[in-house]
Image (cartoon, helix red, strand yellow):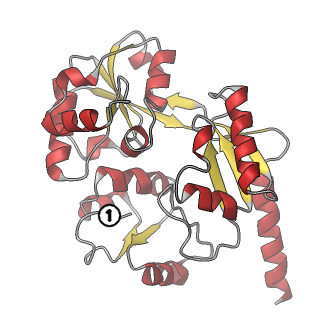
Amino acid sequence: MPYGDLARERVQRFASLADLDAAHCTAEEREEYEPHITVGNTVYAGVDYADVLRAAEAACDIIVWDGGNNDFPFVRPDLLITVADALRPRQVATHHPGEAVARMADILVINKVDAASQADIQFADDSLRAVNSSAPITRAASPIRLDDPGAVENRRVLVIEDGPTITHGGMAYGAGYLAAKVARAEIIDPRLAAAPKIRKVFDAYPHIGNVLPAMGYGEAQLRDLEQSINQADVEVVVSATPADLMRLLVINKRVVRARYEFVETGDCELSSMIDAFLDRIARAERKT
């Protein structure tokens, strides 16, 4: 999902965080790309889907197509996994292309079951089954980990959340807020220090709680995000965006990152289904 000069960003390859720096990626792009790069995967992106695919095919044995909530695959996948958020169970059939990929899925995953009510988990399960009668549904917990819980405990903090989740994603707060509450932190209202372009975001999305969305669709908005953070009367910043804001902004406070983990629950495990799929592929290749 590149932003900016789309002709220049027709086909992109990112193998390191330095590659993202050199390409002047926005905060939103980095939220998508950084988690893959930090675990050692190379990311191919761009707007010429055919050439993006050709570049990946030339370099890789297995391609993982990650569309987030923005698209359905532009290639025909051998295995399509769709994740539904148990904290947003009523969005299964209300958003495009979310409903489309739920209908297309070979495997359905309901995540964040450790944070959602049983009623919402069941509602998500029923909603998925209503649009896809054949795919197995597995569940997963999404525990939140603070890099340094002691630095947050009982402190006055500013919470920064993933931008799209908090704005058009419709959530009032996310992982950072929940982690700060567990650490018994005092969470301040970011509106008290919001710079003009950030105030406009709060005006446009009045559902947002006491969290700061990591908005960075351009240099001016990034600078206002930086100003909003540095003006906040807090001791610590809890950052739950997947992007490392310290590579984009000069922040005058301690930053502690909050991260989601993935933990399988129940008997129907995603890893077992993926292993079975890979075994079938390997057997088919040996026969040829």
Residue type at mark 1 is Asp
Residue drawn at point x = 81 percent, y = 38 percent: 266
Please identify the quarter of the rendering in which residue 142 is found.
Answer: top right
- 221 left or right, relative to 99: left
Quarter placement of the C terminus: bottom right
Rendered position, 124 above or below 80: above
* Near-viewer residue (110 or 143): 110
Q: Which residue is mark 1?
A: 19
Crowd band around label 1 with a 10 angstrom C-alpha radius: few (<14), some (14–19), many (20+): few
**Residue 99 placement, left or right of 245:** right
Percent position (x, y) of residue 6?
27, 73
Q: Is residue 97 above or below residue 246?
A: below
Query: Left or right: 106 with respect to 102?
Result: right
Give coordinates of residue 37: x percent, y percent. 45, 57
Q: Secondary structure at mark 1?
A: helix
Quarter where residue 199 is shown? top left
For the N terminus, the image quarter is: bottom left
At 85% across and 77% down in the image, what residue appears? 283
Residue 264 placement (x, y as % from top left):
73, 41
Residue 161 as seen in the image, left or right of residue 266: left
Query: Measured from the top left, where is residue 183 in percent x and y?
Result: 48, 15
